[in-house]
């Protein structure tokens, strides 16, 4: 029986626990120290560098107007692992609830509908019942905005999160 050595790989760790691994052929997205986001397929992982075929996959309309994916390739790029500043945060759960969009859209819709109904049905917008309902809707809107402000979209590499290649994984 032949045994083959495990190839080079990248590990994204959070407090010594592996949360994501990348090997040759994996789709990889990162933000460089220059704050530029790049994405593509990993072609080679060497010591402290990643060779990536930089590409952009986007949705476009085809000949019949239907959405289809289009890939634009930019070429091979070498990235030093220490030049990687951040990685995208993987959503857990329902994104529109976690980022507050559902709350802000729902509260805005309720407030607009409440005001329109009050104007068209000759009801007072400033009645105590209506102001209570609008106040609750404003509170829900503010809650959604707070969720939006505190929602993470990327993981900053540093003390809590680390990215290692096969050659740079620390041993205890």
Image (cartoon, rainbow, N blue to C red):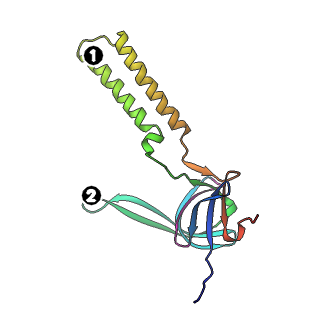
Q: Secondary structure at mark 2?
A: loop
Question: Which residue is disc 1 drawn over?
Answer: 119
Q: Quadrant of residue 123?
A: top left
Residue at image x 33%, y 25%?
112
Residue at image x 38%, y 58%?
59
The residue furthest bottom is: 1
* Label 2, residues with CA under 10 Å away: few <14, some 14-19, many ≥20: few
Q: Is residue 107 magenta?
A: no
Q: Quadrant of residue 22?
A: bottom right
Judge left or right: residue 133 versus residue 45.
Answer: left
Q: Position of residue 52 (x, y in %)?
A: 57, 69
- Tell me, for residue 88, which label it has, or none: none
Residue 97 higher or lower than 34, as above or below? above
| Label 1 or label 2, whichever comes before in sequence order | 2
Q: Nearer the viewer, mark 1 or mark 2?
A: 1
* Label 1, residues with CA under 10 Å away: few <14, some 14-19, many ≥20: few
**Gap between marks 1 and 2 measured at Cα:** 41 Å
Judge left or right: residue 22 versus residue 163.
Answer: left
Pick the quarter of the image with the N terminus.
bottom right
Residue 162 higher or lower than 93, as above or below? below
Q: Secondary structure at mark 1?
A: helix
Q: Quadrant of residue 84?
A: bottom right
Residue 55 higher or lower than 147, as above or below? below
Question: Which residue is disc 2 drawn over?
Answer: 65
For the image shown, how many numbered marks are present on the structure?
2
Q: Which residues are magenta?
A: 24-34
Q: Is residue 28 magenta?
A: yes
Pick the quarter of the image with the C terminus.
bottom right
Q: Position of residue 76 (x, y in %)?
A: 56, 71
Residue at image x 43%, y 45%?
94
Residue at image x 54%, y 36%?
149
């Amino acid at each position: 029986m032949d045994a083959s050595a495990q190839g080079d790989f990248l590990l994204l760790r959070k407090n010594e626990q592996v949360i994501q691994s990348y090997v040759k052929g994996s789709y990889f997205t990162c933000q460089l120290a220059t704050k530029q986001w790049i994405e593509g397929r990993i072609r080679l992982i060497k010591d402290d560098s990643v060779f990536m075929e930089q590409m952009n996959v986007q949705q476009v309309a085809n000949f019949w107007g239907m959405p289809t994916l289009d890939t634009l390739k930019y070429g091979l790029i070498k990235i030093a692992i220490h030049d990687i500043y951040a990685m995208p945060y993987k959503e857990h759960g329902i994104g529109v609830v976690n980022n507050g969009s559902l709350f802000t859209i729902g509260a805005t819709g309720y407030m607009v509908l409440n005001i329109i109904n009050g104007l068209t049905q000759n009801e007072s917008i400033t009645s105590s019942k209506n102001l209570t309902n609008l106040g609750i809707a404003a509170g829900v809107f503010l809650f959604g905005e707070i969720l939006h402000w505190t929602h993470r979209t990327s993981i900053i590499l540093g003390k809590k999160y680390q990215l290692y290649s096969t050659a740079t994984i620390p041993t205890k």
